[in-house]
Amino acid sequence: MAGFTSGDEAPARPGSVLFVCAMNAIRSPMAEHLTRSLYGNRIYARSAGVNAGGDPDAFAVSVMAERGIDISGHMPQTLDELADGFFDLIVTLSPEAHHRALQLGRAQAVEVEYWPSMDPSTVAGKREQVLDAYRQTRDRLEERIRKRFG
């Protein structure tokens, strides 16, 4: 499999990664900006959604700001709107994103990984309960990014 080393070693760090979720409003922008924050220019990171998203999600902006990362200017985009179409790795964060990425993978040589991630916007409750769901998603994405990219 492309990008993997022999034996039990971790996969090679990609030079470019695209994170994809449903609407490019919460999970994929979190992952994109966490990757940029952690790896700088060592990994070219972008994000997109399967469907068109709206304005930046206020809860996502808030929990990322807790880490000193400003995503308030993030403008959601779809896969079809991407200026760059070639990545070493596509990481999908939702089932519909994974299905779409596999279709893209047939047309170009790209590795696709599925990282099932909870959509925190589905959590109901008081503000702090909702923020906790967003923090949990952020923290799990960061943990996965660190583990995968070294």
Image (tube, rainbow, N blue to C red):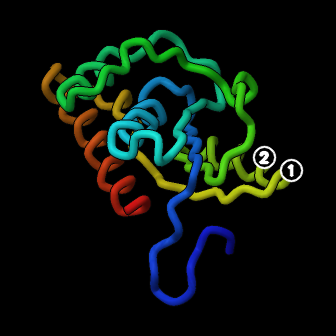
**Residues at badges 2 and 1 in contact (C-beta under 8 Å)?**
yes
**Residue drawn where x is 68% and y is 70% of the image:** 2
Camera-side residue of 31 and 53: 31
**Mark 2 falls on what kind of element?**
helix
The residue tagged 2 is 104
State left or right for residue 102 relative to residue 67: right
Spot occupied by residue 33 in the image (x, y as percentages of width and height):
40, 33
The quadrant the C terminus occupies is bottom left
Q: Which residue is mark 1?
A: 107
Decide if residue 35 is on the left or right side of residue 131.
Answer: right
Relative side of 150 to 130, left or right: right
Q: Is 74 situated above or below 68? A: above
Amino acid found under the numbered disc labelled 1: Ala
Residue at the right extreme, as displayed: 107
Locate the N terminus by quadrant.
bottom right
**Which residue is located at x 48 percent, y 35 percent?**
28
**Where is residue 21 drawn, in percent x and y?**
55, 37
Measure how far apart labels 2 and 1 are at the Cα level.
5 Å
